[in-house]
Image (spheres, rainbow, N blue to C red):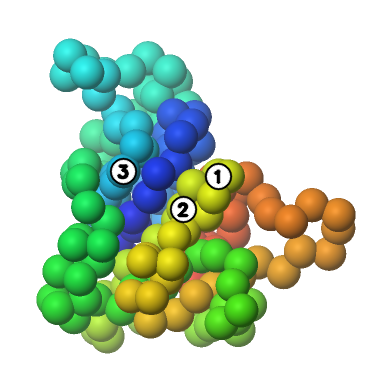
């Protein structure tokens, strides 16, 4: 599985996603837009990142990419299925999607901004849009928590 983190602002959320991605065996993480990476602007490891990631940035291949749309189109042309996590009129509950099995097409899971989610330009490329049902008064979960719920379901349920 490949993961794309689009315009996620919080370094702590990104680092937490790295740690969870390592635990589930994600192949690669792409950081797009304003999503912060493990390195600061001087190319040194960020202490705030590594405190949360616990070194998972060393065990997962990662890359910063400027254009999410161009990346998604390239991955789709390479045979990846694009699955976005977002509340949308065309979304389906994440638990309605079955287990990812090796040997099939590669899956790319796209997570979006904590505030704005994923833009229509990304959603229009997605093969599936997954949603976590919400029963309370809040409309969404923290992006790192949402990632953990969805990625573990896709890998093990």
Mark 1, residues whose alpha carbon is within 10 Å: few (<14), some, or many (≥20)? some
Residue 146 position (above or below residue 41)? below
The image shows residue 129 at horizontal and vertical percentages of 50, 75
Q: Which quadrant of the figure contains the C terminus? A: bottom right
The image shows residue 139 at horizontal and vertical percentages of 74, 56
Q: Are marks 3 and 2 in contact (CB under 8 Å)?
A: no
Can you tell which mark lies on residue 82?
Answer: none
Q: Secondary structure at mark 1?
A: loop
Q: Secondary structure at mark 3?
A: loop
Kindly identify the residue that appears in the image at 67 percent across and 51 percent down: 141
The image shows residue 45 at horizontal and vertical percentages of 26, 18
Mark 3, residues whose alpha carbon is within 10 Å: few (<14), some, or many (≥20)? some
Can you tell which mark lies on residue 33?
Answer: 3
Can you tell which mark lies on residue 112?
Answer: 2
Residue 87 position (above or below residue 55)? below
- The residues bearing labels 3 and 2 have C-alpha atoms spaced at a distance of 10 Å
Mark 2, residues whose alpha carbon is within 10 Å: few (<14), some, or many (≥20)? many
**114 on left or right of 124:** right
**43 on left or right of 94:** left
Residue 94 in sight: no
Residue 111 position (above or below residue 45)? below
Kindly identify the residue that appears in the image at 49 percent across and 47 percent down: 113
Q: Which residue is mark 1?
A: 114
- The residues bearing labels 1 and 2 have C-alpha atoms spaced at a distance of 7 Å
Using the rendered view, name the quadrant where residue 119 is placed: bottom left
Mark before the other along the chain sequence, 3 or 2? 3
The image shows residue 114 at horizontal and vertical percentages of 55, 44
């Amino acid at each position: 599985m490949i993961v794309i983190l689009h315009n996620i602002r919080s370094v702590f959320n990104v680092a937490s996603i790295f740690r969870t991605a390592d635990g589930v065996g994600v192949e690669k993480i792409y950081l797009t837009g304003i999503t912060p990476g493990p390195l600061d602007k001087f190319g040194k490891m960020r202490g705030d990142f590594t405190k949360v990631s616990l070194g998972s940035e060393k065990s997962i291949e990662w890359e910063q990419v400027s254009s999410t749309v161009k990346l998604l189109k390239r991955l789709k042309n390479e045979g990846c299925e694009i699955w976005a996590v977002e509340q949308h009129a065309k979304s389906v509950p994440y638990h309605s999607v079955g287990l990812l099995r090796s040997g099939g097409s590669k899956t790319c899971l796209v997570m979006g901004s904590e505030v704005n989610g994923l833009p229509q330009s990304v959603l229009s490329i997605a093969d599936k849009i997954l949603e976590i049902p919400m029963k309370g008064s809040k409309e969404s979960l923290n992006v790192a928590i949402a990632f953990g719920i969805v990625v573990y379901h896709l890998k093990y349920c």
